[in-house]
Amino acid sequence: MNILFYYPDKERAVSLSSLMIAFRKQGHQVFLLTHSMEGNLHREVKKHDVGTFSYPIKKNISFLFYLKHILYLASFTRKHNIDIVYSHIQRSNFISAFAQYLSPSRFILCRHHSDCVYVDYNFTERLFDIIINRLGREFIVPSQMVLTQVKIKEKVRTKKIHLIRYGYNFDEYSKPDPDEVRKIRNTYNCNLLLIKVARLIPEKRHIILFRTVKNLVEKGYDIKLLVPSDGREREVLHKFIVDNHLEDHIYLLGYQDHVMNLVAASDLVVHVSCSEASNNFIKEVSLLEKPVIVCSGVGDFDEYITDGLNGIKISKDASPAELENILEKVYLDKIDIHTLGKKLRQDVVQLFGIDNIIKSYSVFHEN
């Protein structure tokens, strides 16, 4: 069977590369087509005999941009006799929703967001979802939360939707560099070093964590926060840091290639996002046995994280006061975060290992 992964970006995504490699091991011919020039993702899967292609064009006029991609994708599927297209991310899904009517291939649109387009009130992205939902013939969603969003709130017919969790080849993850980890710990030396890795956008709610750190610092706690991320809220968050004299406690580091070194140096991962589909990062940090704080009712956290057993959960409507109370307990060693981290690793590896997840795709490949 000839299988195409259609994806806009070039950066490494282990949940995607794990699938591609697993399909190759099953004997399928696998192709990757992106909108971006060749990057880390292409180089990673090429080592496993995945055919890699890209079609980068400038987005000067949106209509022409999408029309060219629609026509190219349809042509690509015919040229390479593609049986199944797994389309990933909204932009690709929008293109695939039209291209499937010009191609003999079976198109399966993989949804990677939950309700962020409603939380962020993005009209264009909401419109894209409406069109994708109307035209799409089959969908894969990665969590029960996304399934509920698509089926109940967006009225997509149940028979069109398949729930398949993200799958990972955990052996593909490189280990942190011990020397770099020591340097980071020395550079940001403190009693409690936090880290939050998420785009600097409203729904990731960095400001709640920033206000919490501010309150704890004012109480005299020796605490610091690393933020290795970029996004449109950077200036707003930077202003908060400066206005509250937190330059020695909160560090906006920008995008980092080796973020796992920073995670390994930190004591606790805090992720107070209010909108997720199935967060990759929390699963990745579990491999380092790092304890995490997440919000209940968000993404698939409720499906594998139990408060007090393998993580810490706060309400989706968390206030700085609620988060502050938790972090005070962690700081004062009233919560055994190390035990939580070890249990999280065990549960994540068991639930999301690629060898288990790949079996769910037989519903497409045996038809």
Image (spheres, rainbow, N blue to C red):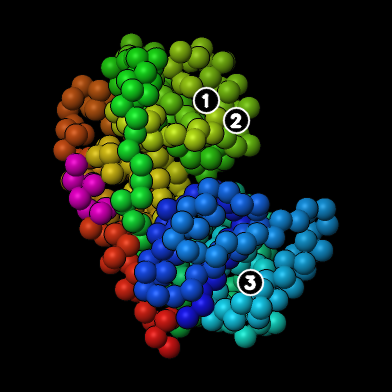
| Whether residue 282 can be seen here | no
Hey, which residue is sitting farthest bottom in the picture? 367
Q: Which is more toward the observer, 13 or 193?
A: 13
Label 1: how many Cα within 10 Å (few below 14, some 14–19, many 20+) = some
In magenta stretch: residue 343: yes
Image-based side of 36 in relation to 58, left or right = left
For the point 36% across and 42% down, the residue is 174
Q: Relative to residue 71, is residue 128 depicted above or below? A: above
Contact flag, marks 1 and 3 (Cβ < 8 Å): no
Label 3: how many Cα within 10 Å (few below 14, some 14–19, many 20+) = many
Q: Which is more toward the observer, 322 or 286?
A: 286
Residue type marked 2: Arg
Image-based side of 113 in relation to 338, left or right = right
Secondary element under disc 1, as helix, strand or loop, is strand
Contact flag, marks 1 and 2 (Cβ < 8 Å): yes
**Which residue does the numbered mark 1 point to in the structure image?**
252
Residue type marked 3: Ser
In magenta stretch: residue 98: no
Residues at marks 1 and 2, CA–CA distance in whole angstroms: 8 Å
For the point 38% across and 81% down, the residue is 363
**Which residue does the numbered mark 3 point to in the structure image?**
96
Magenta segment main secondary structure: helix
Residue 18 sits in quarter: bottom left
Residues in magenta, as a range: 342-349
Residues at marks 1 and 3, CA–CA distance in whole angstroms: 37 Å
| Whether residue 365 can be seen here | yes
